[in-house]
Structure formats: C-alpha cells, structure tokens
Image (cartoon, grey):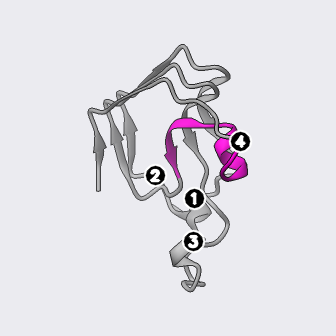
Amino acid sequence: VPLVGNLGIKVTPSMALLNTDQTPAVFWIVTGKNYILRNHAVASRRYGFWFRPEISATGTSVNTPDVHPINIPLLEFDGNQAHSNGKYGLRVFDVYLPNE
C-alpha cells in the first residue's frame, strides 16, 4: 500500500507505551516494501521519517520465520519533506541490508 501525500504534524513522546514511543517519528516505516511519496513530516519531538526494519518479523507476523524486513529493498522514497523535527528528518536505524 503506497503512502502518498500525507501531512503529519507535532508528534510527541509517550512514556506509558513501548520504548520506541519515547522517541517518536511522524512516519515509522518497518519494511522496505513500500512506496513512500510526497509526504511531509513536521515538528516531531524526534524524527520525521524513521526507517527501522527488524531482523525478523514481529507482532502478529512473528510466526513467519522466513520474513526478514532488514533484507527487503525499499521500493521508492521520493519527494518527501521533513522539517522542524527535534533530532533528524530521516533516520535509518540500526542496520539496513537489502538483498537487491
């Protein structure tokens, strides 16, 4: 499903949820198999776009041992803008090793 033409504004941390919620992003991307086009990430306390693929599937997909998001190539990331974010406009965390 493409993520196209969205505007995200003023994302703040939550200390009551997951550890990752303490360092929020306007757009949190966990797999490369996406088209991320012409989005605007504005005024997050931490990150505009956070690309964080896991080594293996998590959550409801945990029973899919052959899925490794860290190796899935990003289909397209173009025309996106990030500004006035607390730390980075784009963060790629921790390691990204696409197969293609």
Label 2's element?
Answer: loop
**Label 1 crowding class (10 Å Cα cut-off): few <14, some 14-19, many 20+?**
few
Q: Earlier in the sequence, mark 1 or mark 3?
A: 3
- Residue carrying label 4: 15
Percent x, y of residue 84: 54, 13
Given residues 35 and 62, the one toward you in this image is: 62
Label 1's element?
Answer: loop
Q: Earlier in the sequence, mark 2 or mark 4?
A: 4
Residue at point 26%, 33% (across, down): 5
Q: Amino acid at mark 4?
A: Met
Q: Which mark is residue 98?
A: 1
Taking 42 as reference, is 90 above or below it?
below
- Magenta range is 15-29
Foreground label between 3 and 2: 3
CB of mark 2 within 8 Å of CB of mark 1?
yes
Q: Earlier in the sequence, mark 4 or mark 3?
A: 4
Taking 20 as reference, is 84 above or below it?
above
69 on left or right of 17:
left
Taking 90 as reference, is 57 above or below it?
below
CB of mark 1 within 8 Å of CB of mark 4?
no
Q: Earlier in the sequence, mark 2 or mark 1?
A: 2
Q: Which mark is residue 59?
A: 3
CB of mark 4 within 8 Å of CB of mark 3?
no
Foreground label between 2 and 4: 4
Residue at point 67%, 23% (across, down): 87
Q: Amino acid at mark 1?
A: Pro
Percent x, y of residue 55: 67, 66
Q: How far is mark 2 from mark 1, CA to CA?
A: 8 Å
Q: How far is mark 3 from mark 2, CA to CA?
A: 21 Å
